[in-house]
Amino acid sequence: MKPNRIKSLWREGKPVLNGWLSIPNAFTAEIMAEQGYDSMTIDLQHGVIDYQASLGMLQALRASEVATLVRVPWLDPAAIMKALDAGAYGVICPMINNRAQAAELVSYVRYPPDGTRSFGPTRARFSAGSDYSAKADENILCLAMIETAEAFEQVEEIVSTPGLDGVYIGPSDLTLGLTGKRYRTGFDREEPEMVSAIQTILAKAHEVGIRAGLHCGTPAYAAKAVSWGFDLVTLPNDVTLLAGAAAASVSDTRKLIA
C-alpha cells in the first residue's frame, strides 16, 4: 500500500502543512496540490462539495505527493466508509463530543476485529495498492474534531479512545461553545482563554501519544501553532486564496490606473 505521507512526516518529527478544498473541482484540487502542501483535505461538511465531486478530486490529487483527507459531514458510517472506499487516506469528523462518539468514529474507520468498517474499497484498492485490505488500518488516519464545550470537558476521555490517531481543533465552533457570542467567530484566536483552551487540548493529546491539528486562518498563526507543538496545521482554503488573489489583482490594477 502506498504510504501515508502524513504518518511518514510525523515519524520524522516534522509538522504537516495541510491545504483545504471547498470548491468542487478536480482542476482546482490539482492546482492546489502542486503548491507544496503535505496533505490536502476535501471538505464535505462546509464546502460546496458532494460525493461525486470529491471522487474526481481524489483522482486528481493522486498525481501529486500529497496525502488525501476528507472532512466528512457528520458522524455517519455511510459517509465515512464511502470516503475511505473512494481512496481518502483519512477522515476528519466534526462534532465529536465524548468518548462514546470517538469510539464510534474509530469503529467506522477500522476493519474488524478492531472496528466495523464494511469491506469494499472500490477505488482504494487501485489508488492505494492491491494490499489495501491488509494494510489500511495501519495507514488510514482517524481524526476527531474538538469544537464544543462538551468535547472540551471530555477531552481526556476522547483522546484516550483506542484507535484514535489524533484530534483536530475547529477554533470557530470551539470559541462559540466556550464563550457563546462574546467573541466574533474566526480561526486565529488571540483571547487568552481561547489560547489556553487550544493549548490544553494539544497537551492532553500529546500526553497519551496521539497527534493534534489546528485549523488556521493565516500562515503566521500556523507557524505559531507549530511552535506550540501542533503536528498538523491547516492553511487558508482555496476559496480564501482565490478571493484574496483576485481582490489584490483588481485593487493593484485600479491603483495603477489612477
Image (cartoon, helix red, strand yellow):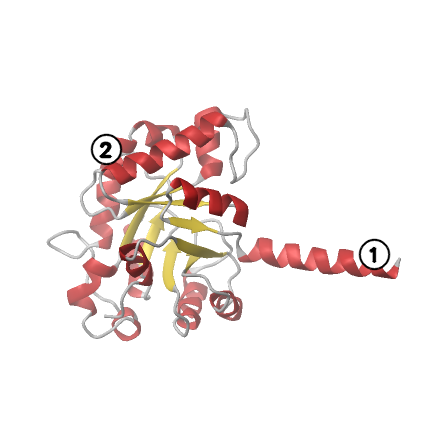
Q: Is residue 161 left or right of residue 214?
A: left
The answer to which image quadrant residue 42 occupies is bottom left
Mark 1 or mark 2, which has the lower sequence index?
Answer: 2
Q: Residue furthest right?
A: 258
Q: Nearer the viewer, residue 104 or 68?
A: 68
Camera sees residue 182: yes
Q: Quadrant of the C terminus?
A: bottom right
What residue is at 51 percent from the left and 43 percent from the top? 221
Give the residue pinned by disc 2.
157
Q: Nearer the viewer, residue 211 or 9?
A: 9
Q: Is residue 55 left or right of residue 143?
A: right
Local crowd size for mark 1, using a 10 Å CA cut-off: few (<14), some (14–19), many (≥20): few
Q: Is residue 191 left or right of residue 116?
A: right
Three-letter residue code for mark 1: Lys
What residue is at 29 percent from the left and 34 percent from the top? 204
Camera sees residue 43: no
The answer to which image quadrant residue 78 occupies is bottom left
User: Is disc 2 placed on a helix, strand or loop?
Assistant: helix
Local crowd size for mark 2, using a 10 Å CA cut-off: few (<14), some (14–19), many (≥20): some
Three-letter residue code for mark 2: Glu
* Horizontal and vertical percent position of residue 143: 31, 48
Give the residue pinned by disc 1.
255
* Horizontal and vertical percent position of residue 59: 40, 72
User: Is disc 1 placed on a helix, strand or loop?
Assistant: helix
